[in-house]
Image (spheres, rainbow, N blue to C red):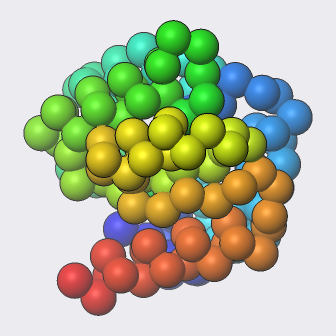
Amino acid sequence: MAHQGTSITNILILDSNEQDIVQTQWILKEVFDSVLIRVFLHGGNLLSFLQSTSMSQSNIPDLIILEIDFPDDEGIRTLQAIRALPAAASIPVLLHTRTWNFNLIEQGFKAGARAIVPKFSPVQLKSQINRILSELQAA
């Protein structure tokens, strides 16, 4: 696992809004000296990647940034499916959303999210990413 300049930080993003994706990528590139960002527009594609053989031990993501406000609860179902995958169950997930649906947010925490950050608060996003990754390095 990498953090702030020590090596490449590997982050996955699940979001369907292209403008939000661009902003998130910009923030991540400010936080990390070297970051590999993979973007998924659909939960099924993210899950397929996590289940693929290309996700070797050295390729396990450091963090997943997930928008939970998708039609048909795709965001929540994707988070639940991530937690059910042995190889991905321990990857921290940060919810990054515009939703004010507190039921949906609560479902996200119950499904295993580590934090939630409203879009777009660059300071909060940077702070939460640093906190989560620092906690993991200390463990």
**What residue occupies the far bottom of the structure in this picture?**
138
Vertical relation: 109 (above or below) 71: below
Of residues 101 and 8, the one nearer the viewer is 101
Vertical relation: 137 (above or below) 44: below
Q: Residue at x 17, y 33 (%)?
A: 84
Of residues 14 and 48, the one nearer the viewer is 14
Quarter of the image with the C terminus in it = bottom left
Q: Residue at x 68, y 44 (%)?
A: 100
Give the image quarter of residue 17.
top right
Of residues 61 and 18, the one nearer the viewer is 18
Of residues 36 and 66, the one nearer the viewer is 66
Vertical relation: 134 (above or below) 112: below
Residue 97, image x, y percentages: 67, 44
Quarter of the image with the N terminus in it = bottom left
Task: Tally the numbered discs.
Answer: 0
113 left or right, relative to 37: left
Q: Is residue 8 visible?
A: yes
23 left or right, relative to 114: right
120 left or right, relative to 47: right
Q: Residue at x 68, y 66 (%)?
A: 125
Residue 90, image x, y percentages: 23, 54
Residue 12, image x, y percentages: 52, 43
Q: Residue at x 12, y 39 (%)?
A: 86
Q: Is residue 49 visible?
A: no
Give the image quarter of residue 51.
top left
**What residue occupies the far left of the structure in this picture?**
86
24 left or right, relative to 96: right
Residue 60, image x, y percentages: 32, 49
